[in-house]
Image (spheres, rainbow, N blue to C red):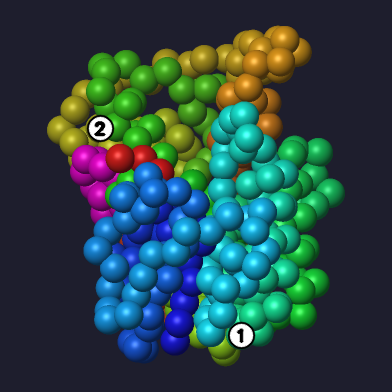
């Protein structure tokens, strides 16, 4: 199998490359597709003979088609939670997915795997969730065989969730929005990597949209307290009123400042409590336990 990974320098892309064929147990050649030399330097050693790095641009249809030529599967890993100039939700999720779908169809790719988000809905008023839903709709309408993996907060090596946990533990007091009462159901990045690799096979979770979540749903504050306990630290939790954060962000957006937004606030404070078994069973994976993924997260590593 020849598998192309877009966004290969992300935490998920790097986890896929570190695992190589992993549980799939198939001979695979990986094409790690990135958009810059800086991104290419972030990649781990490529697994297997014949794997290579490819520079791509989503504004270059011919280049994408050439990269996808001969690929049996494309793993598309779009994602940006905090918008920056030139990196909007629409561009990160919809524009890139449209370009990938068109190139994959032209190259006769057998399977397209999209990593999306729990809560994705093209009718949502939240732009993050809406554009995730629009990306999913493009994949489902593509005529390609596909698997959509909707994921929650991702923890583990190199993730933003892990970086946030380490920041909280760097002080004796952690201030959480709304006191950290919102429910998280974190997923280990290594589990996501295994799931995406397995889903690249033609008949695994074919034409399915799966909520791939971790085994435990718990309040944000309990997750921080659990991390502190595992690290042998004492920590006090205090609350930042969510209404006050919303007001500050509304003012920030009104004066045209980019960065953390009301949409992003809604994403990180959304409650997630889903049955983890349907997706895990469909993909044939064992989910990493919460304590283990927290330990992975507390190891040093740059966030992606």
User: Where does label 1 land, which residue?
Assistant: 110
Residue 277 location, x and y as percent? 51, 70
First of labels 1, 2 by sequence position: 1
User: Where does label 2 land, which residue?
Assistant: 228
Pick whichever, 143 or 60, lies toward us: 60
Quarter of the view holding residue 133 = bottom right
Residue 73 location, x and y as percent? 54, 79
Residues in magenta, as a range: 291-301
Closer to the camera: disc 1 or disc 2? 1
Identify the secondary structure beneath mark 2.
Answer: helix
| Mark 2 burial class by Cα count in 10 Å: few <14, some 14-19, many 20+ | many
Residue 1 vertical position relative to residue 252 in the rendered view, above or below: below
Q: CA distance from mark 1 to mark 2?
A: 45 Å
Please name the residue shown 36% across and 70% down the image: 52
Please name the residue shown 66% across and 84% down the image: 108
Residue 289 vertical position relative to residue 143 in the rendered view, above or below: above
Residue 111 location, x and y as percent? 60, 80
Residue 70 location, x and y as percent? 53, 84
* Magenta-span inclusion, residue 295: yes
């Amino acid at each position: 199998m020849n598998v192309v990974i877009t966004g290969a320098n992300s935490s998920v892309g790097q986890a896929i490359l570190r695992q190589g064929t992993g549980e799939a147990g198939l001979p695979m050649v990986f094409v790690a597709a990135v958009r810059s030399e800086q991104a290419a330097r972030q990649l781990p050693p490529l697994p297997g003979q014949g794997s290579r790095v490819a520079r791509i641009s989503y504004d270059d249809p011919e280049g994408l088609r050439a990269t996808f030529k001969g690929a049996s599967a494309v793993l598309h890993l779009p994602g940006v939670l905090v918008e920056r100039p030139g990196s909007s939700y629409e561009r990160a999720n919809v524009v890139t997915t449209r370009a990938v779908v068109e190139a994959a169809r032209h190259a006769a790719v057998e399977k397209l795997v999209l990593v999306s988000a729990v809560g994705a809905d093209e009718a949502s008023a939240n732009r993050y969730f809406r554009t995730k839903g629009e990306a999913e709709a493009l994949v489902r309408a593509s005529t390609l065989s596909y698997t959509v993996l909707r994921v929650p907060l991702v923890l583990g090596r190199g993730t933003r969730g892990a970086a946030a946990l380490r920041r909280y533990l760097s002080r004796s007091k952690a201030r959480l929005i709304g006191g950290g009462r919102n429910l998280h159901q974190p997923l280990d990045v290594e589990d996501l990597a295994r799931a995406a690799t397995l889903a690249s096979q033609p008949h695994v979770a074919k034409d399915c949209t799966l909520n791939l979540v971790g085994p435990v749903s718990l309040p944000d504050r309990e997750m921080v307290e659990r991390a502190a306990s595992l690290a042998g630290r004492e920590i006090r939790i205090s609350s930042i009123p969510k209404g006050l954060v919303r007001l500050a962000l509304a003012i920030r957006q009104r004066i045209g400042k980019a960065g953390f937004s009301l949409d992003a606030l809604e994403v990180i404070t959304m409650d997630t409590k889903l049955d983890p078994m349907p997706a895990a069973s469909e993909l044939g994976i064992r989910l990493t336990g919460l304590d283990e993924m927290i330990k992975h997260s507390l190891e040093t590593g740059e966030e992606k």
